[in-house]
Every structure is written in structure tokens, then in C-alpha cells.
Image (cartoon, rainbow, N blue to C red):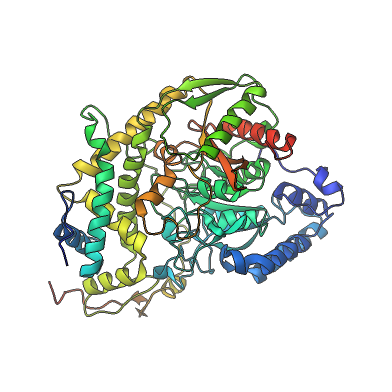
Amino acid sequence: MSATPTTTSSGASSGNTPTTAFEIAAAVRAGSVKAIEVLEAHLARIAERESDIHAFNLVTADAARESARRIDGMVAAGRDPGALAGVPIALKDNMCTRGVPTTCSSRILEGWKPPYDATVVSRLAELGAVSVGKTNLDEFAMGSSTENSAFGVTLNPRDISRVAGGSSGGSAAAVAAAFAPVSLGSDTGGSIRQPAALCGVVGVKPTYGTVSRYGLVAFASSLDQIGPFSADVRDSALILESISGHDPMDSTSIPQGPLDLLSVLDHGVKGMRIGRITDMPEGADPDVLERLEAAFDALRAAGATIVDVELPSLKYGLTAYYLIAPAEASSNLARYDGVRYGRRVDAVDTNSMYMATRAAGFGDEVKRRIMLGTYALSAGYYDAYYGKALKVRRLISDDFARAYATADVLLTPTSPIPAFKVGEKADDPLAMYLCDVYTIPTNLAGHPAMSVPFGTSRDGLPIGVQVMASTLGEQPMFKAAAALERHMNDAGGMS
Amino acid sequence: MPDPSSERISAAAVAKVARLARLDVGDDEIARMTVQLAGMLEHFADIDALDLSDVEPMTQPYPLRNVFREDVVKPSLDRDEVLANAPVAEDGRFRVPPIIGLDG
């Protein structure tokens, strides 16, 4: 890692309880705070509010206490537990944890205990992070509200009559409720950024290939990417530096070292070119558009230049995504057949067993996507649907390439609307899909993008602004995100 | 029950897709899915107007290259730990019902 928390962090030396991952790691490494104390404070908040929020499928309190005590023992013995010493972290329940149930919020994997750890899970443990549990998600990460979980909806800590977003709703809510300072999610079409926006936290989808997908249960393999949630931009930079870098176990992993992000956070945006998409897909709430304008103003005031860019193919992103992602999912989810793991419904022969097992194990949305994907890939329809979608994906990627020739980053809303009421869109799949209109194009291109909290709606609901960048453009992306955050902090959270 | 088939997709096609996807789906569910899938395909028809004849399909964000490594023995998953997850295991293997189907 290029930069690690130092023992002179103001949060650690002030004598107050550290709250961010950066401050916690610094304080634990310095021996001024014990990992077990930090953990107990978070477990106490979980005990107090989790029954209202349902961020977790499983809280692993005992294992977490064991890890925290081991880290404190290392510090006492004069050894450095690592850059994330004593940092509690929540993991989306589609990341494999050895011997700990990993459900993908699906009945079909109920009871399954992975025989190995995902690469991100082992990296976090090696750096001294303390896993507190597995967070709720839309089944197999398919959804935008966490209402598709087989184990019940996750509610938004800012307003528990509303959804936390999805599919990583549990991970977003866990950070928003301070159950953990940081968490991991996965983002296939917006599943980190949209819940981050709805819950008022930071969420990052890095460049495809920067974070290993080994041990992430596959949804759509050419689109899936793991990334962090946090309360501030610095903590997301810290976690992303920690989990990025080449992994031989993932054949799509980019052969390069970890990202260098903490060192650029204070660089400012002077001279940066911020792109405004003149033909951005319509349908965003007026409050959301107002906050987007305020974000352009803030970056302009900080010394950036605003440039207009056109991306005429962007409006076809939703169609391309909802053909490509289900097609890949229908193939990936063929493995759930009741033979090797998870649930089985007994039948007289294997074919009937597959059909009965899958019918009983998958929820409605997963079935819908498998059906859509199977149809798009089937003989006679492949060229009309899947083949055409792949060509549209190229058009969108080419549009981005032209835009990034004149702009360093692009700004859009993260979600067209703030958090909606539980049940409001549950019966209208297409309306739910439209929640992803601004986040999807990034995944199709494989680019990085992040959501930064940037004020609230008239009703007081969090609104996120999305900062997008080109392949491996994480540095300019984090510079712009940090500048937006500074603006909010300087304005006392009011502007 | 009225036939939910539309110009976009027929109930018979949906039933066939369900069989291909190995999903045991009842008639009510087929009817409901037909209406939902037709609505989606209607929306997705927006790309029909595009001229894509000269566009190269894009399957991945990056051009993938085959990854080679030395053929060395590395630890693999523990068999007992893997089989402990199986619905039914016997003699170190997964047990399944007869493969030769009764319905072909």
C-alpha cells in the first residue's frame, strides 16, 4: 500500500473514540484503543437497532470477538496487525467465508458453508480487519431494493418506512446505522452505488478487474465487481487500496499492484475537466437534479472546468444491460441443481429433481431473470436480443471513450429518485429496473464510478451524486469525490 | 384463463423457456411471466431502430488472454468439507436419483 494510517491521526490522539476505519486502525495500531472495545461499541449498536433495520443475515459476534482479542494480543506483543487493525467490517452475503453460511439471500443456498474464503475476505483478515457478519441482499444480487431477499427486506436507517436500496442494501444500511464503519458490496449494475445514495453513505464500484472476484458468488461475470461502503471518502480509499491488486485466482484480474488513492485525496480539482452529459437519460426527480447542479457549482468554485459531453447511446444502456446481465445469470445459475450443495427437492429422476429444486429454491425475480436470459440466448432469438445487446454495449463504450477525451470525470445523479417506500415498486419489475438507469452504463464499459452523499431532498432523504471515470481513473474520481465531500463539510452539511 | 400471449412472446414460448431453464413452473406462473416478459421485451425494442451492422460485439470490458502457469501441485479443497455440503453423499461421492429419466 502506498499510504497507511499513521499513529498521529487526530482522531486517535484526541482521546475521543475513533469512528472511521482510518482512525480506528491508527488508534489500535498505536495501542491507544483496544480492538475489542471498538468491536463491543459496534455490537452494542447492532443489538440496539438491528431488529428495526435487518442489515444482516448473520452476525458473527463470537468469531469477531476472537479476532479482536487476537489483534489486541499482537499489539501487546509489539507486532503490527496491519493497515486495518481492529476495523469492524460487514460483508455482503454473496462473498464466501469458510465455514460460515453464505446464502446470497436465497433459499437454494440455505445452510451452505463455503469450503474456502473469497480473496477479499482473506486479504481483509490478513490486514487485521474484523468481520462482524454477512449482510442482506436481493437474492443473488438481483434487485434495487433488497425486497427480493428470501429473508426479508432491509430498511433504510434514515427512514425505516423506506427501502435501503439494493442489491447491497444490507451493506449500505450497516454503515448508515454505524453497525460497522465500513462494509463490502458487489456492483453489477449499480448495486453498491444506488443503496449508498439512498442511505447517505459513500459507495464505490472500482474498475472491472481491480478487485478479485474469486469467491464472489457470480451473477453476471463480465459486469460484477466488489467495492466498499463507508461514511467518508477516505475510508473507501483505504478499503479499496487494501482489497485491490492482482489475484491469480481470478483470470479477469488486472495484473497490477494495489490502487494508490489516499495520497491524492487532498490534491483538489484545480484544472480538472468535469463532464456534464447534455443528453443524459431523463426521469430524475427535480430535487436530485438540483443537487447535481449544486455539485457542478461546487467543483467549479473549487477550480474545475465544466465541459459538455454527448453520449447518444447512453439511453440504450438499460436495454443492453437487462439482456446481457440476465443472459450471463441464466448461465451462472445453472449450477444450482441440488446435487453438490444447498437445497434439494427429491424426485424420481435427475431432471425432475433439477426442475423441482430450482422451482422451490429460487424467488420470483431470480426466476424472471433466468427466464429472460434463457430466452435472449435461445436458438432463433440470440441475434435479435443477446447479440444486439453486445453491439449496443460497444456503442456505449465508444461513447464513453469520446467523452473521456475531453473530460476527466463525469457527474450524474446516482439514482433518479431518493429512497422509496417499502412495497412501492415491488410489483412492477420494469419500474424497479429504471432505478439503475444512471449506474448501468459504467458496468457495461467496465469503468469505475462512485456515489458521494451530497445533501438531501426537500423531504430530508439523502441524495447521492455519481462521479464516473474511465478505466483505472480511480485517482481523478477520488479527487473529485473528496472535493464534493469537502464542500459539504465546509457548508456544515447544508448546501 | 385468457391466453396471455402477445406479439412479443407467446405463452407456449415461455413454457418452453422454463423447460430449457429447468424451472418447474405452473400454468398460472407461465401466464404471469408471459405478461411481464412481453412488457420488458416491448421496452427493450428501443434498440431495434439502431443500425448495428458494422458494430463489433463487446463481451468483456477487456480483451481476455489465456492465463498459463507452471503445472505444479497445489492444495485443493478438502473432500470431506466439500461433501459435508452435499444434500446426499455416499462413499466419498455425490448421490443423485437415476440419470436415465422416466420422462425421457
- The front one of B79 and A40 is A40
Q: Name the residue rendered at 40%, 51% in the picture.
A: A432
Q: Work out whether residue A126 or residue A421 is closer to the camera in this orientation and state it.
A: A421
Q: Residue furthest left?
A: B104
Q: Nearer the viewer, residue A453 or B102?
A: A453
User: Which residue is found at the position 68% from the left and 27% from the top?
Assistant: A267
Q: Examine the image and state in which quarter residue A71 appears.
A: bottom right
**Image x and y of residue B44, in percent:** 27, 43
Q: In which quadrant of the rendered image does the N terminus of chain A lie?
A: top right
Q: Position of residue A146 (x, y in %)?
A: 48, 59
Above-or-below relation of A402 to A225? above
Report if residue A383 is visible in the image. yes
Can residue A476 be spotted in the picture? no
Q: In this image, A207 relative to A127: left or right?
A: left
Tell me where residue A18 appears, x and y as whole percent. Answer: 78, 52
- Image height of A168 relative to A310, above or below: below
